Image: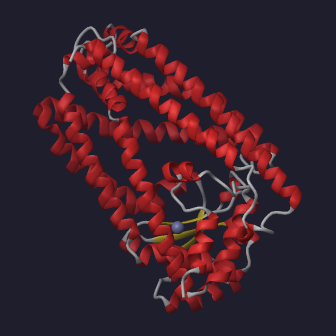
């Protein structure tokens, strides 16, 4: 295939993706104006419902601006061969290929982050602020940035160096060795994320003594989930939005409740949310998701190995010679339809897991408190009550509130 053909394919992929996203987003905004089905009546007071509509409209417009901006930018960059120009420019500082690869990705990371900062500031300090969600102080925002950079440089630097080394050693056979390494890394992160990474950004404390702990105690011992693995996180440091999640494997398993969740929900509702999270653990969702993730990564690395040394792919990005980083970047674009498809399957699977966790909570604790908790979360977070089914199919990792309520009502 000629470099020109490869370039045209890349531009076609990006354009098609942009069009599909715009159509989905348009359908989603149309669907919001429909009448509310009877199961969802009364979740919002009239005034708050209008507020949620305004909030969703504003998010939609913001998404339009950011995605159009990135679309135009990447098309300009690709058609001017700017990646090749950057590669050529870095050559004067690093003749040695592996160093240039590290510098190339470092430069791209800095550039894309600098471009993104104004959008992040607007989203946090203008939109979220306006709807009273934002609790992030400028100091937290800046510290988050710095910590994020350090983590990226440290973890990204190590993984990228390992990849470069393996490609130099084994050529296109690198993928199997790198797969083993990255698989081990994913396993490690899955186990230690909540104890190593999360504390860098948030305070994580064991659920303290008191009436809530007692209420949870009874349920936790019934389903045999150790209370010592239940933690509270200071989500209120950044946002008023509430959440809860399950993380980790084996002894490292943790159920994490946001302080914002505890603040706004009754004890019964909190136990129901906890029961849902315990359902994810009992049904082994974390383990299966991780196995899928590792298999997908292996597939991706194998496809990458097919074009890792191709000169045409480098030339398509405007490169003068074959460069590992140009090929990796081009691969990222060429592979994106596959990762979109895999993402849709992943969401399908994730939604199935959510139904199962809900069912577990209904059977071991009760449906009503979980339903009221989910309704309250929807209204407090000004969530979209009526997303378009296609938008849900592609993007939602959780079923909609209506789908969850109907599924719970059907359990008996
Ligand atoms: Zn869940």
Residue 366, quarter of picture = bottom right
Q: Nearer the viewer, residue 171 or 9?
A: 9
Outermost right residue: 47
Considering depth in this image, is 109 or 407 the residue closer to the camera? 407
Disc count in the image?
Answer: 0
| Residue 308 location (% of width, % of height) | 21, 28
Residue 221 place in picture, x, y as percent:
51, 91
Tell me the quarter of the picture where residue 127 sits: top right
* Residue at point 59%, 70% (across, down): 404
Does residue 275 lie above or below 297 as drawn?
A: below
Q: Is residue 137 visible?
A: no
Q: Residue at x 30, y 35 (%)?
A: 160
In this view of the protein, which residue sits in the foreground, 393 or 183?
393
Please indicate whether residue 225 sits to the left or right of residue 114 in the image. left
Look at 42% across and 11% down and name the residue there: 79
The image's colouring method is: secondary structure
Q: Quadrant of the C terminus?
A: bottom right
Question: In the rendering, at what x and y percent does residue 312 appear?
Answer: 22, 16
**Quarter of the image containing the N terminus?**
top left
Task: Give the image location of residue 8, x and y in percent.
Answer: 35, 17
178 displayed left or right of 30 = left
Q: Is residue 340 something one can see in this rendering?
A: yes
Residue 330, above or below 263: above
Q: Is residue 130 left or right of residue 86?
A: right
Relative to 331, say whether 204 is above or below. below
Q: Is residue 276 above or below residue 48?
A: below
């Amino acid at each position: 295939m000629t470099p020109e053909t490869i370039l045209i394919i890349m531009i076609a992929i990006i354009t098609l993706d942009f069009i599909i996203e715009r159509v989905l987003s348009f359908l989603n905004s149309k669907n919001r104006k429909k009448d509310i089905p009877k199961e969802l009546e009364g979740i919002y007071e009239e005034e708050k419902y209008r507020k949620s509509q305004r909030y969703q409209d504003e998010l939609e417009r913001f998404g339009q601006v950011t995605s159009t901006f990135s679309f135009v930018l990447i098309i300009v960059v690709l058609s001017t061969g700017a990646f090749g120009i950057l590669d050529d420019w870095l050559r004067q500082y690093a003749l040695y290929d592996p160093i240039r690869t590290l510098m190339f990705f470092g430069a791209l990371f800095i550039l894309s982050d600098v471009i993104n900062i104004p959008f992040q500031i607007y989203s946090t300090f203008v939109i979220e602020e306006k709807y009273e969600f934002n609790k992030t102080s400028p100091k937290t925002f800046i510290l988050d940035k710095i910590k994020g950079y350090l983590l990226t440089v440290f973890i990204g630097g190590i993984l990228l160096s390992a990849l470069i080394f393996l490609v130099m050693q084994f050529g296109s056979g690198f993928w199997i060795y790198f797969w083993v390494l990255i698989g081990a890394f994913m396993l490690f992160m899955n186990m230690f994320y909540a104890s190593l990474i999360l504390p860098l950004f948030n305070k994580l404390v064991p659920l303290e003594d008191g009436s809530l702990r007692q209420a949870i105690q009874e349920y936790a011992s019934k389903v045999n989930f150790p209370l010592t693995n239940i933690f509270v996180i200071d989500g209120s440091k950044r946002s008023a939005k509430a959440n809860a999640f399950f993380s980790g494997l084996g002894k490292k398993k943790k159920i994490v409740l946001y302080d914002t969740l505890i603040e706004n929900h009754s004890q019964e509702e909190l136990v129901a949310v906890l029961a849902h999270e315990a359902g994810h653990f009992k049904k082994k969702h974390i383990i299966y998701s991780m196995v899928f993730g590792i298999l997908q990564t292996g597939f991706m690395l194998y496809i990458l190995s097919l074009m890792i040394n191709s000169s045409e792919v480098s030339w398509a990005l405007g490169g003068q010679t074959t460069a590992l980083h140009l090929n990796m970047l081009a691969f990222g674009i060429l592979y994106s339809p596959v990762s979109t498809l895999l993402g849709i399957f992943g969401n399908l699977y994730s939604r199935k897991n959510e139904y199962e966790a809900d069912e577990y909570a209904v059977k071991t604790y009760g449906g009503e408190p979980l339903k009221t908790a989910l309704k309250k979360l929807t209204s407090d977070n000004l969530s979209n009550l009526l997303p378009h089914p296609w938008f849900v199919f592609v993007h939602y990792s959780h079923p909609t509130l209506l789908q969850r309520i109907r599924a719970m009502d059907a359990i008996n």
